[in-house]
Image (spheres, rainbow, N blue to C red):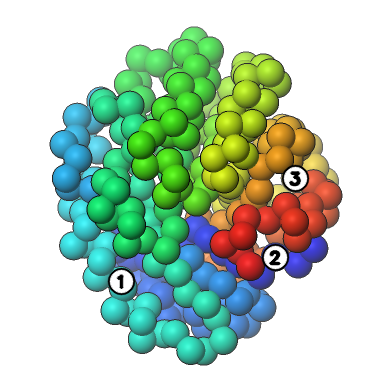
Amino acid sequence: MTITHDLHIHTALSLCANREAHAEGYLAIAKEIGLTKLGFSDHYWDEHIDAVFPREGVESFYGPQNTAHIEQLRPQLDALRGQGVEILFGCETEYDPFHHGVAITEAVAERMDFIIVPNSHTHMMMPASLYEPYEKHADYMVNAYREIIESPVSRYITAMAHPFEAVCCPYDNRLLLKLISDDCYRRLFDRTAQKGIAIEINMSCWGRKTHAEIEQDPVLHLFCLAKECGCRFTFGSDAHDHLAHQTYADHTSFVSTLLGLGEEDLSPITK
Ligand SMILES: [Zn+2]
Ligand SMILES: [Zn+2]
């Protein structure tokens, strides 16, 4: 199946993105590579939610990435509409471990076209003492996942961003996937499906990989379980630079075929 959407894109408003990454550049490349829907999702922490961060440096990351900051993109996107590519304004907000929920208020969530939330930004949200033993790290992500999908704003969540793929992990993050039982995944994915939240298939880790390498990736097992549980999917590049976006479509159809996905397996927002 050809994937024609990308619902995970960062512009220069994300402090970790390339300073030159802009919506216009993404749109130009989207037309080249045949995408018909782009969802912009800069990093976001709602300033109405008081933040208690367990790690140094996180406050200076999320503090400035507030509502006024990400809203700067909205008029830029409005100017790019009507060119044959549907454009959505959203955000990648955060798991809020302090309040056991999500770092966005209902008032702001209402105004977003879509929202993605990761349970796996453990490099920011998890105390570093939980990296080892690995079981603690895996348990942290299970608990974060549960709290996200059970949070009061869960009905606004479009997809779980890169689920269980621990970001900037000091060791191979795939080691963690096997520490969580299939039963545990199934319980979480059953609930995810019930809530109408999609599972994101994040392409960023496969950029330079061969098809043979992708086939061996243990994260695919999670997607198979999620599919069995009736979850729908979104695809996302997680691009932090529009020039890097050129390769986004290289593997999406391979992965969707590998997982046996059909149109009915994609989240309605992708249509
Ligand atoms: Zn992320
Ligand atoms: Zn991202």
Check disc 3 and report the residue beneath it: 214
- Kindly indicate whether the residue at mark 1 contacts the one at mark 3 (C-beta within 8 angstroms): no
Check disc 2 and report the residue beneath it: 3
- Residue 14 badge: none
**Mark 3 or 2, which is nearer the eye?**
2
The secondary element bearing badge 3 is classed as: helix
- Location of the C terminus by quadrant is bottom right
Residue in the image at 48% along x and 65% along y: 39
The secondary element bearing badge 1 is classed as: helix
79 in relation to 261, above or below: below
In this rendering, does residue 164 appear at all?
A: yes
Amino acid type indicated by mark 2: Ile
How packed mark 2 is, by other alpha carbons closer than 10 Å (few <14, some 14-19, many 20 or more), is many
9 in relation to 54, above or below: below
Residue 196 coordinates in the image, percent (x, y): 57, 45
Tell me if the residue at label 3 has its CB under 8 Å from ligand 1: no
Disc 2 to disc 1, how far (Cα)?
25 Å
- Residue 73 badge: 1
Disc 3 to disc 2, how far (Cα)?
17 Å
**Mark 3 or 1, which is nearer the eye?**
1
Q: Residue furthest top?
A: 133
Amino acid type indicated by mark 1: Leu
Q: How many marks?
A: 3
The secondary element bearing badge 2 is classed as: loop
- Kindly indicate whether the residue at mark 1 contacts the one at mark 2 (C-beta within 8 angstroms): no
Residue in the image at 26% along x and 46% along y: 105
In this rendering, does residue 172 appear at all?
A: no
For this view, does 263 lie left or right of residue 143?
Answer: right
Amino acid type indicated by mark 3: Ile
Residue 101 coordinates in the image, percent (x, y): 34, 32
- Location of the N terminus by quadrant is bottom right
